[in-house]
Amino acid sequence: HSDPNAPKSIESRDLESFHLRMEVDFTVTIPAKEGEESATVYPTGMYDLSMERVGGDVAVKIDFPDASYEFMTDDSAIISLEELLREHNVASMNGHSQRNSALGTYIDLEAKYASGERISIYAEGGASVIPNGWSEDYFIAFFDGILLKETGKSYASNLVEDNSDPDAVKEFTSDEIGEIYVEFDPDAGGYGTSEFEYGDYRFQYMKGRNLPYEGVETNAALWIDYDKACEFDCDEEDLNTFNAWIRDCGFQAQNGWNKSTTLPSDMRLELHVSYENGEFLTIEGDGKDALPAAWDPEAFLNMLRDMAERHGVPFGALKEQ
């Protein structure tokens, strides 16, 4: 029932009201901006977002999955929303109205302007009914940003439980590593094109020789799903590389990090490093948006591969070609 003749541009910049009800079928990830610690992830479910001028103020209603908010704010919010609509050329989808018998998609958007102009978008069914150029990401991020500005806390932050230790040492006096333990699950959704096997990884180093595991005669080894992928003797050059990686990631300044998310995720990290002087570094996160932004499992595996190859050891974490 689309209207191909509906105007595809809006002259007015005076937005009077906005209402969007949509079903999100996949988790929405907003990448971390510079200075932010981690990406922001929003859950699947129904979102109902609205804003309307009431006299000189603006009424805002936000229904996120399992959480609702309602408050008044000034007109800067609706002015910013109009700029968002213009920035993403939402008017180009005006008049779109498609429906089929499949499941997973629901979009109902209506924006009204003081000039009488309006934007109307409707879609219900499968992915094929979604209009070209549509993205729910910036709408969710925008309304959560308004919520953060007005209440001091965003919806996304409510989805992460933070048990971090603020008193953990943040400035380390030693680079002499005694032990390393890194356990992680890479993100299944991002590993379809990776050259590394997907699975549960564990890397360990213990100063000296012979890790306390049967069949391991070196001081370092990598496992995938409890199967040994490679082993080698870490030397001073390897440990310097590892120390540089820790510093580049800023993990020492984040020591004591311990966060978990209520959102479903296959991504997890447990990083422990003990130093010869008794200092201890620990980073723990469960869920994609509960991890430090600097954590990159593929970069970590590449670093281990370079170490193994320098020692002439085959790296068994690679996919078969």
Image: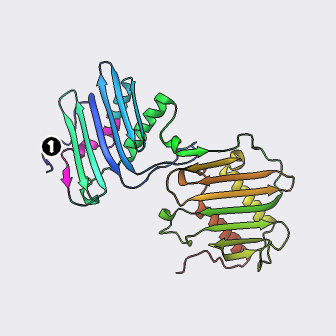
Residue 138 position in % (x across, y down): 39, 44
Q: Is residue 214 magenta?
A: no
Residue 189 position in % (x across, y down): 47, 63
Q: Residue tagged by mark 1?
A: 6
Q: Is residue 222 left or right of residue 320?
A: right
10 Å neighbourhood of mark 1: few (<14), some, or many (≥20)?
Answer: some
- Is any atom of residue 194 visible in this view? yes
| Residue range (magenta) | 83-99
Residue furthest out toward the top: 56
Front residue of 233/104: it is: 104
Residue 79 position in % (x across, y down): 34, 29
Tell me what residue is drawn at x 37 percent, y 42 percent: 139
Tell me what residue is drawn at x 75 percent, y 52 percent: 281
Mark 1 lies on a secondary structure that is loop
Q: Give amino acid for label 1.
A: Ala
Tell me what residue is drawn at x 31 percent, y 39 percent: 85
